[in-house]
Amino acid sequence: MSKNKLSKFADMATYPHVFEPPFGATDEAAFEMKGRWGELFFHNDHPIVLELGCGRGEYTVGLARLFPEKNFIGVDIKGARMWTGATESLRDGMKNVAFLRTQIEFITRFFAPGEVAELWLTFSDPQMKKVTKRLTSTHFLARYRNILADGGLVHVKTDSPFLFTYTRYVVERNHLPLELCTDDLYGALPGADDETRRILNIRTYYEQQWLDRGLTIKYLKFRLPQAGELVEPDVEIELDSYRSYNRAKRSGLEKAK
């Protein structure tokens, strides 16, 4: 591990708004903040919004600046990246920001049922080879149901045509209420109000890289009700051509009619 990474980890160990539970903990392990984030950390009853796979935390910090009446928690396993947003928010004295270093598979360990109002998934790895690793799969949606309020919002912002298409099929197959959907965020966004446009103009480090390469950014916003069985779509999806996957290889799903 580089000295730079070690220095960042040392910094975050002293940050009062960064939580790093022991690795290897399971869903059943106790976590004192579960169900009590508002009471014990934020000291208010404002809605809680999570950015899952927050990377450098640009969205976590950017959204917190736009919405001081909400609380934001960035979640990621890579602490060296998280250091950027954690340091910026601490330096600026932001009181509605926290960071949690853990695997998203264990998310139900840290939040009680209904404790979270919204989720953001920003530029998640599309995981084209394995369905259960995709953060918009029914495997993960079932976990999100355990912490989201009934009908809570899920925002998905991605450069990946594969993940965008897959998520649309998941939403359609499960009749999830879709509020916004575009395959070219900065080209056209029908139905979006000024507030939504301001939110979506927060640009992450990786997003700017994709834009610089001439790729379009896709966005979906849908609600996740508690009721109903979640079913995987039975479709074939073309793989992203600009990633290190064989475009001709099947995604493991049957071809759409």
Image (cartoon, grey):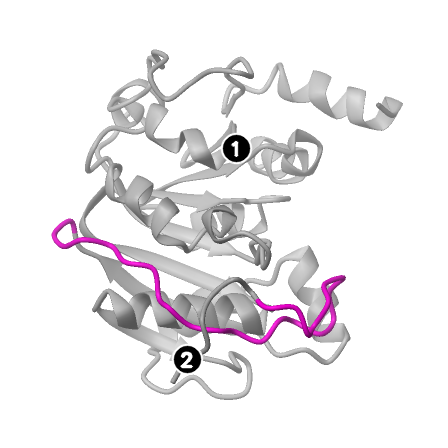
Residue 256's disc number: 2
Residue 148: quadrant of the picture: top left
Quadrant (top left/top right/bottom left/bottom right) for the C terminus: bottom left
In the depicted structure, whether residue 16 falls above or below residue 223:
above
Q: Is residue 137 above or below residue 217?
A: above
- Magenta-tinted stretch: 226-250
Residue under the image location 55 percent in, 70 percent down: 162
- Residue type, mark 1 in image: Gly
Position of 249 compared to 48: left or right? right
Q: Could you tell me which residue is drawn at 53 percent across and 82 percent down?
A: 184
Q: Which residue occupies 24% across, 64% down?
A: 174
* Front residue of 111 and 87: 111
**Does the rendering let one see residue 198?**
no
Mark 2 Cα within 10 Å, few/some/many (few <14, many 20+)?
few
User: What residue sits 69% from the left and 73% below the top?
Assistant: 247
Q: Residue 129 vs residue 157: left or right? A: right
Q: Residue 27: within the magenta?
A: no
| Type of secondary structure dominating the magenta stretch | loop
The residue that label 1 is drawn on is: 93
What residue type is disc 2 on?
A: Ala
Residue 166 x/y as whole percent: 45, 68
Residue with the most extreme left position: 227
In magenta segment, residue 246: yes
Judged left or right of residue 104, residue 240 is right
Q: Nearer the viewer, residue 87 or 180?
A: 180
Mark 2 vs mark 1: give the one in front.
2
